[in-house]
Image: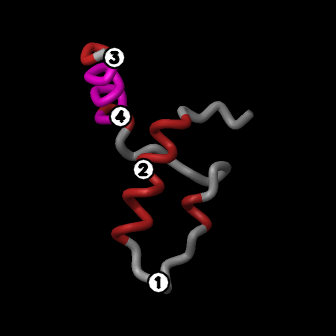
Amino acid sequence: MLDLEPYAYLSDVLARIISRSDTDPIDDLLPYNWVNTNAGQTMLEMSNIATAA
């Protein structure tokens, strides 16, 4: 519904959760506030997955 790439969203959010401190707000991790900072890297990873299959 929000026109997000599910793989990109989940991989980025999970990586951010690991690197955050306990006091950081989580508002930027919600789907409607999320900004893909690794758009090019995610597309490269997905193309590697497609060629490996």
Helix, strand or loop at disc 4? helix
Within 10 Å of disc 2 (Cα), the crowding (few <14, some 14-19, many 20+) is some
Q: Determine which residue is flagged by label 3.
A: 50
- The magenta span reads 41-49
Residue at mark 4: 42
Residues under labels 1 and 4: Cα distance?
A: 26 Å
| Quadrant containing the C terminus in the rendered view | top left
Q: Which label sits on residue 22?
A: 1
Residue at image point 47% right, 55% down: 13
Q: Are marks 4 and 2 in contact (CB under 8 Å)?
A: yes
Give the amino acid at mark 1.
Answer: Asp
The residues bearing labels 2 and 3 have C-alpha atoms spaced at a distance of: 19 Å
Residue 13 left/right relative to 29: left
Q: Residues within 10 Å of mark 3 (few under 14, many from 20)?
A: few
Q: Earlier in the sequence, mark 1 or mark 3?
A: 1
Q: Residues within 10 Å of mark 4 (few under 14, many from 20)?
A: some
Q: Earlier in the sequence, mark 4 or mark 3?
A: 4
Q: Is residue 16 magenta?
A: no
